[in-house]
Amino acid sequence: MNPQWIHPSLKKTTNIQITDAMKTVYSILAASALSLSAPLNVTAQGNSTHELNVINQLATQSAVSSMPVSQLLNAPGNEALKAFFFTPVKDPTLLKGKRIAVLAADGFEEIELTGPVWYFKALGAQVDIIAPKFNPAPARYGLSTPEMAKDHIMAIQYLNPVGWIKVDRTADQIKVDEYDAVFIPGGAWNPDNLRNDKDVIRFIQEFNKSGKLIAAICHGPVVLASADILKGKKLTGYWNIQVDLKNAGGEVLEQPVVTDGNLITSRHPIDVSDFSIAVKDWLITR
């Protein structure tokens, strides 16, 4: 992501590492070049043409896609979202003393994490990025993992990897009494990574028993379904997970944001401003 696309106040209030767009492109192209070299290695090792043909059929064509944050904010219909980010907050101490844990893993939707984090920090809150313990894939999966994956998690934009953010703590290290609220961003991969982590599920269940705020946006609410805390709750979420939320006992509403007791949920990246404001309002009244 090119730094010129980021509003100055966002740079000051987050610990997000802004990676130059061209470096990202070069990295992807380099990875593509390495994958394309695999068939050549097969030939060099004296394997059959048949094996080469099979490998070429198993591999898909690489492509580079990009949606800078500025493009989302400038899209027709998102004027209110743009105004939310570019209008300076009136009281930078409004959430002073509040502690918020962000539960996230590889594959989180970028703006659904960076947007609320920017806002809560701008209002004076302490915000920690919490991820499951690093657990590299088994060798037989044939995957290579960048060194930074040990203490960073990967952002996506509608399924396209775009960058990394530093993790402050891991889920096995945190306790309920350390935070006033927890929120879970979406992203199609992120919730699947979270819902299979026993430390994440344990923390959510204990946090819910405390009555403190739990907030989730987009695909994030499915993690709450895995924690079995949705029975009888009114909520919302991304359209293709709404049936899962109903099956978990929730009453799904088609609204930008739904608040029910200590639960706040939203549907989509375009709801980030409504979601963030609802979390702020909940925290300042308690």
Image (cartoon, rainbow, N blue to C red):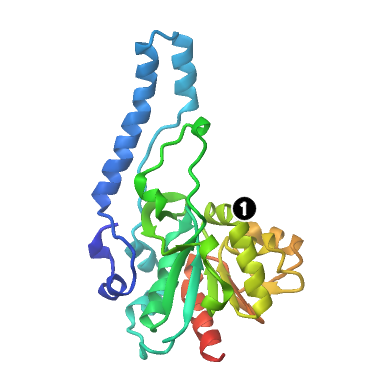
Residue 61, by quadrant, is top left
Q: According to the image, label 1 marks what residue?
A: 196
Residue 221 as seen in the image, left or right of residue 119: right
Q: Position of residue 107 (x, y in %)?
A: 48, 53
Q: Decide if residue 77 is in sight here.
A: no
Residue 155, by quadrant, is bottom left
Query: What residue sits 28% from the left and 67% below the top?
Result: 6
* Residue closer to the observer: 86 or 34: 34
* Residue closer to the observer: 51 or 93: 93
Residue 85, by quadrant, is bottom left
Query: What residue sits 59% from the left and 52% below the top?
Result: 192
In the displayed structure, would residue 200 be above or below residue 286? Answer: above
Q: Quadrant of the C terminus?
A: bottom right
In the displayed structure, would residue 72 be above or below residue 274? Answer: above
Residue 44 as seen in the image, left or right of residue 276: left
* Residue closer to the observer: 212 or 50: 212
